[in-house]
Amino acid sequence: MYKKVFPSLLMILFFGIIIDSVIKISHKNNLNNIDSYFEYYSTFFLGCFLVIVAFYCYLQKQNSQVVHNFFYLMYVTGLAISLSKPSSMELPFSRDMEILSVSFAPYFLMKFFTHFPVTAKPKFFYKITAATFWLALIINVINICTFIRPDHFYADIIRIAAIFNIMVALIACIILIIFHLRSNTLWIKNQLYILIFSIGVSFAPVLFLSLIPGEIFDQYSVPYYYSLHSMIVFPITMAYLLTKQEIIDFTASFDKYIFSISSIGLILILINIWFIAV
């Protein structure tokens, strides 16, 4: 019962946080052209898309551990993306929630791969999974310390540690996939090739065009609200792979939920139009 209700509560919390952030941004900025609208609001749409796709998958197979892990992974990723802009505007609550979600995203990525595509894993993978969790915990403890004694040094540690955690998790997952390519059927190998491609397309622009040059080396970088949109490839690919593995039957259930999904999308559009008008 808990596992079935908890994701629904998380969805309510997610949209509550998003609406609160949208209100705060609309009060601080006059979005009078399409460029400013794209800069301030496009990340909200992207984050909501990731979470809605994952929640839709969860609705189809609520008893699947793979789908549960996929939902939690997309949830923290979508939350981090949605809060990236309000966090950059130094909104305290948004910044803290962004740090929380970004720091734990690598752990949930590793947890997802503990069940996908197969459950057999080498020992090093479990050790790295534990390491990503403890590093995320340390990041948030340091962030709490900044409440007591604000310091730019702590902020730099948090930023670099979070990026390091992401890179370690991505590298570990790619190595794991390569190991699976050596000892599985051709059908599974084809799915893994697609997965590797999606990870590269999704995360490479964010890491190598925005985070690494801009945040670590303080050099010119592509604005994150442009590079982040490449991450849409990963959830779409995962939905495809889960469908091919017959974990989720999209074809049979799409008509059942098309009205709900369309309603959510329309509500989000109307909310944004209303804030622009106000």
Image (tube, rainbow, N blue to C red):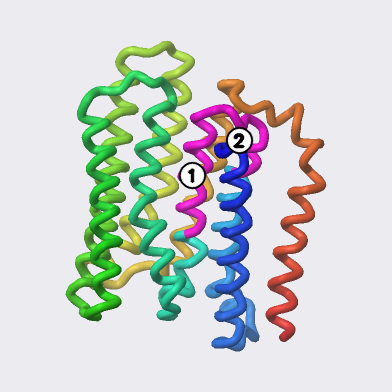
Secondary structure category for the residue under label 2 = loop
Query: Mark 2 highlights which residue?
Result: 1
| Magenta-drawn segment | 55-79
Instruction: Tell me residue 107's x, y (percent).
Output: 34, 44
Q: Residue at x 56, y 21 (%)?
A: 245
Q: Which mark is residue 110?
A: none
Mark 2 Cα shell of 10 Å, populated few (<14), some (14-19), many (≥20)? few
On the picture, is 176 further left or further right than 61? left
Q: Is residue 199 magenta?
A: no
Instruction: Locate the C terminus and report the quarter of the image it occupies.
Output: bottom right
Q: Earlier in the sequence, mark 1 or mark 2?
A: 2
Q: Is residue 66 magenta?
A: yes
Q: Is residue 245 above or below residue 134?
A: above
Q: Which mark is residue 72?
A: 1
Asked if the residue at tag 2 contacts the one at tag 1, i.e. Cβ–Cβ closer than 8 Å, the answer is no
Distance between the Cα atoms at labels 1 and 2?
A: 17 Å
Q: Is residue 135 above or below residue 179?
A: below
The amino acid on which the numbered mark 1 sits, given as a three-letter code, is: Tyr
On the picture, is 80 further left or further right than 51? left
Q: Residue at x 47, y 24 (%)?
A: 191
Instruction: Tell me residue 124's x, y (percent).
Output: 20, 29
Q: Quadrant of residue 247?
A: top right
Secondary structure category for the residue under label 1 = helix
